[in-house]
Image (spheres, grey):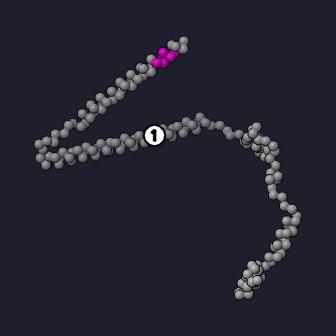
């Protein structure tokens, strides 16, 4: 049975190929025929300058007519494409009417969220507080002492201004030994 199905598919494909080839041949013949009717061969040899100018004007007039027709056809095609698009949207709107369910809030912990996202890859608990930096009371005391030493910055600036301040900075750096 499978051989018969395969054989029939092959025959259908061969038939389709033959029809496609015949269709391209017919289209080429119609094109040659149409161009023969619309565009007769030009007889330029032996014509005077005035006759050549007249022929050029006629050709330009024909080109203008063809361009107008082409523009009209393009406008019709664009209008039809817009209409088709609008109708498709209407069909989707009519066929796709449904109510969206009301969503309810769900409280999920970080561990449950990671398990849901990663599945079995998620190992251990996600303790966010474990990753925080620990601060000791001694560190806080040292920061208070340092801030007290710095004091008011305006006093430091006034004390270090002028030549006396530069001398103090030089002496503090160890240059005045």
Q: Nearer the viewer, residue 67 or 159?
A: 159
The spot of residue 60 in percent (x, y) is 24, 46
Q: Nearer the viewer, residue 143 or 172?
A: 172
State whether residue 35 is above or below residue 145: above
Q: Residue at x 54, y 38 (%)?
A: 90
Q: Nearer the viewer, residue 155 or 53?
A: 155
The spot of residue 1 in percent (x, y) is 54, 12
Q: Residue reaching furthest front?
A: 177
Q: Secondary structure at mark 1?
A: helix
Q: Residue at x 80, y 55 (%)?
A: 132
Residue 139 visible, this angle: yes
Q: Which residue is mark 1?
A: 81
Q: Nearer the viewer, residue 116 or 126?
A: 126
Q: Residue at x 82, y 49 (%)?
A: 127
The magenta segment is 5-10
The spot of residue 101 in percent (x, y) is 71, 39
**Mark 1 crowd level (few <14, some 14–19, many ≥20, 10 Å Cα):** few
Residue 158 sits in which quadrant? Answer: bottom right
């Amino acid at each position: 049975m499978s051989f018969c199905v395969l054989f029939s598919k092959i025959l259908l494909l061969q038939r389709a190929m033959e029809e496609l080839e015949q269709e391209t041949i017919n289209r080429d013949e119609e094109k040659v025929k149409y161009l023969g009717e619309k565009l007769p061969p030009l007889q330029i040899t032996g014509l005077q300058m005035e006759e050549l100018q007249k022929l050029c004007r006629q050709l330009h007039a024909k080109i203008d007519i063809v361009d107008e027709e082409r523009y009209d056809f393009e406008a019709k095609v664009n209008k039809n494409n817009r209409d088709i698009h609008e109708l498709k949207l209407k069909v989707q709107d009519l066929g796709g009417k449904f109510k969206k369910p009301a969503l309810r809030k769900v409280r999920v912990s970080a561990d449950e969220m990671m398990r849901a996202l990663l599945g079995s890859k998620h190992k251990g608990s996600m303790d966010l507080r474990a990753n925080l930096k620990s601060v000791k009371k001694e560190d806080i005391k040292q920061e208070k002492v340092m801030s007290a030493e710095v004091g008011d910055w305006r006093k430091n600036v006034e004390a270090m201004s002028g030549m006396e301040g530069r001398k103090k900075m030089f002496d503090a750096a160890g240059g005045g030994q």
